[in-house]
Image (tube, rainbow, N blue to C red):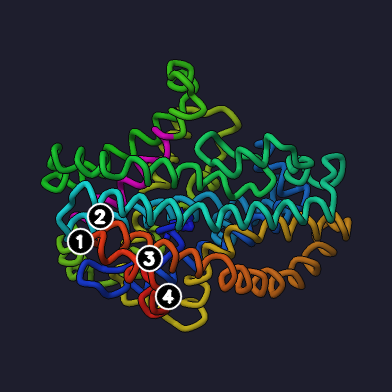
């Protein structure tokens, strides 16, 4: 969203976050790292059948059981999987908009943006698909065992792999976090158009109302009646639900100085932090059932307010210094790799060990965490970091005069890595 998921999850959601002045928003790097690790925890807990049934089958939790504590109380903050992806999306909108605000745009600069962005997203995704496919061959998927979440991981087919490689037509569960990359790609393709629309609408003059409108659009788009009225609802419904989330980040970027001034008026940040976190997970705290109702829509809107609040806190609150510590920064710089490759490892381990009850699986999951982090470090060095360098060289080559392109395509200095 990263960005993650990233120039999020989603790649701006998971790449560097350069400020308009050229420096990095280190706290946003840290937020990406925390969000990526929370997705890992979320998927690890979905291996437990009692947890997966709450998410996959929309069942209600039995009061006072472990899964009830994790799902219906503030302990939900341990595993805010979907909310973490929404954070990636907001960060992507924020980071990708900053250069548009500070640099004059031309047809060549837009072409360079597309060249950088497509390479930056697709090369790591293709590496992740290859990694997931190898694990799925080594440890065959078995939908008849384990939790209902594990059951959604079917043996790979040519069609599934093709969709995962293309992204824009939807993805399979070979590596399910790729679903968010579908919307990262669509946003990346439509970013210049969305930026022009925001400028024409002069959203910067009524930015709070603009954010409220985008939140309402995202929440309303999930009603069955709306989806039924849309052509290609699997695509257009997703665009209406998720592109407004990116748009929130775009508006925040356009009003960066105003938001910074507002932050100076806050005397105590702890109520703001607690409120944003609770709002973010509010859909889990209020039982609504499997049917999407007006109450569900209201909670979805409130959750997006919380997501925007979390990004605001990471930008402005004194507590953001926690996000700037070295371990969190490491997680931030590797967040895209963590996000892309963790799930195939979890699925393979669950199938090999056969552990899905609470206690045995928790021991396995704890042992897997360093494995995931080491694998992410390797993936970052072998796949993601070279893709960042390649995307930069291609972008510079597109912008350079023809006579200088060969020189521009020379390898970039490692310290130049940004978006």
Q: Which residue is mark 4?
A: 323
For label 4, the SS is helix
Q: Are marks 2 and 1 in contact (CB under 8 Å)?
A: yes
Looking at the image, which is closer to me, 23 or 53? 23
Q: Quadrant of residue 13?
A: bottom left
First to last magenta residue range: 239-254
Is residue 39 highlighted in magenta? no
In the rendered view, would you say 20 is above or below 291? below
Residue at x-position 74% and y-position 59%: 346
The label nearer to you, 3 versus 1, is 3
Q: Earlier in the sequence, mark 3 or mark 1?
A: 1
- The CA distance from mark 4 to mark 1 is 19 Å
Q: Earlier in the sequence, mark 3 or mark 4?
A: 4
Which circle marks residue 256 in the picture? 1
Which circle marks residue 393 in the picture? 3
* Residue farthest top in this picture: 229
């Amino acid at each position: 969203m990263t960005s993650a998921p990233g120039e999020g999850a989603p790649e701006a959601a998971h790449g560097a976050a350069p400020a308009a002045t050229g420096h990095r928003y280190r706290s946003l790097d840290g937020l990406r790292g925390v969000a990526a690790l929370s997705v890992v925890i979320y998927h690890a807990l979905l291996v437990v059948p009692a947890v997966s049934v709450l998410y996959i089958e929309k069942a209600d939790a039995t009061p006072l059981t472990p899964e009830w504590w994790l799902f219906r109380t503030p302990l939900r903050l341990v595993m805010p999987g979907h909310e973490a992806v929404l954070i990636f999306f907001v960060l992507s909108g924020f980071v990708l908009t900053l250069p548009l605000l500070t640099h004059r745009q031309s047809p060549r600069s837009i072409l360079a943006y597309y060249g950088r962005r497509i390479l930056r997203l697709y090369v790591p995704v293709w590496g992740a698909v290859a990694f997931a496919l190898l694990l799925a061959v080594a440890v065959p998927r078995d939908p008849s065992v384990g939790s209902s979440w594990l059951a959604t991981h079917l043996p790979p087919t040519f069609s599934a792999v093709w969709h995962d490689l293309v992204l824009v037509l939807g993805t399979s569960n070979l590596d399910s976090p790729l679903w968010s990359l579908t919307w990262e790609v669509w946003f990346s393709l439509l970013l210049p158009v969305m930026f022009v629309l925001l400028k024409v609408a002069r959203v910067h003059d009524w930015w709070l109302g603009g954010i409220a409108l985008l939140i309402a659009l995202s929440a309303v788009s999930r009603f069955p009646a709306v989806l039924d009225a849309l052509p290609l609802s699997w695509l257009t419904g997703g665009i209406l639900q998720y592109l407004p989330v990116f748009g929130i980040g775009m508006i925040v970027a356009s009003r960066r100085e105003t938001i910074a001034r507002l932050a100076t008026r806050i005397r105590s940040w702890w109520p703001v932090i607690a409120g944003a976190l609770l709002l973010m997970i509010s859909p889990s705290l209020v039982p609504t059932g499997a049917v999407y109702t007006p109450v569900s829509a209201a909670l979805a809107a409130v959750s997006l307010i919380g997501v925007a609040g979390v990004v605001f806190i990471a930008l402005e609150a004194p507590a953001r210094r926690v996000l700037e510590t070295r371990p969190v920064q490491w997680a931030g710089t590797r967040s895209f790799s963590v996000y892309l490759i963790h799930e195939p490892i979890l699925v393979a381990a669950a199938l090999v060990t056969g552990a899905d009850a609470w206690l045995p699986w928790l021991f396995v999951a704890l042992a897997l965490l360093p494995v995931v982090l080491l694998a992410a470090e390797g993936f970052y060095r072998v796949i993601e970091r070279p893709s960042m360098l390649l995307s930069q060289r291609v972008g510079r080559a597109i912008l350079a005069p023809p006579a200088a392109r060969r020189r521009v395509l020379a390898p970039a200095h490692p310290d130049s890595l940004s978006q």
